[in-house]
Structure formats: structure tokens, C-alpha cells
Amino acid sequence: MSEPHVTLDPRGLDPVQQKLRGPLEDQLTSALQAAADRIRADYAGEPVEDVCRRLLDETRAGLHPDIAAGFNPDMDEFCRVAVAIVRGEIS
């Protein structure tokens, strides 16, 4: 798996969010990648469910509180990233 990336569905965005979509995706992606790197470095055999939960928590912790509060990712996609971490597929 390549580096994780966040893509926002424009249909779920209000007009202001649509105007800020690019920078917002960049910030979310940066926070997700940083969280994935930290978790990968510290991974010690935890179950995928725990890794997925930690990935979400650490991604939100890397965001401005207002952005974190509104960040509701597709958890299936987040768990795919967690599976890749567990399998060692993210370098």
C-alpha cells in the first residue's frame, strides 16, 4: 500500500468546505500519514481494531480542534490503512 491519502467527497461538503477542499485534504492527509508513521513505528502486535481506533484518535489529535470535530472518515477506509500497518505494507 502506498502512503494513505484523504479524499473528500464534494457531495458532502458545504460551499465553504468546497472552496477549501484542496488545502483541507492536504491537512487531513498530512495528519493521517503522521499518525500512520507513529503507529507503524510503535506497532507491537495489537489487533487491527485497536490500530484502527488509534489511527483515528492520533489523526484527530494532529488536527485543529474544529477540523478534528468535523472529521468523520469512512471507517472502512481507515481500517484498510490499519490492516496495512499490521501487515507491514506501509513503509
Image: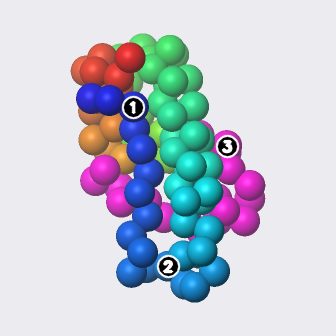
Q: Which residue is mark 1?
A: 3
The circle drawn on residue 17 is none
Range of the magenta residues?
58-77
Cβ–Cβ under 8 Å for marks 2 and 1: no
Name the amino acid type tagged 2: Leu
The amino acid type, in three-letter code, at marker 1 is: Glu
Rendered image quadrant of residue 89: top left
Q: Residues within 10 Å of mark 3 (few under 14, many from 20)?
A: some
In the figure, residue 53 lies in which quadrant? Answer: top left
Between disc 3 and disc 1, the foreground one is: 1
Q: x and y percent of residue 75 in the render?
A: 35, 55
Residue drawn 40% across the image and 38% down it: 4
Quadrant into which the N terminus falls: top left
Q: Nearer the viewer, residue 72 or 3?
A: 3
Q: Tell whether 78 sits left or right of 58.
A: left
Does residue 32 lie above or below 20 as drawn?
above
Residue 32 visible in the current orientation: yes
Instruction: State if disc 1 and disc 3 touch (CB < 8 Å).
Output: no
Q: Position of residue 40 (x, y in %)?
A: 45, 20
Check disc 2 and report the residue beneath it: 13
Q: Is 1 a magenta residue?
A: no
Whichever of labels 2 and 3 marks the residue nearer the N terminus, that label is 2
Task: Give amino acid for label 3.
Answer: Gly
Crowding around mark 1 (Cα neighbors within 10 Å: few <14, some 14 to 19, many 20+) is few
Q: Main secondary structure of the magenta part?
A: helix
Q: Which mark is residue 62?
A: 3
* Residue plotted at (48% across, 64% down): 72
Q: Is residue 47 visible?
A: no
Identify the residue at horizontal 55%, vertical 84% (top origin): 14
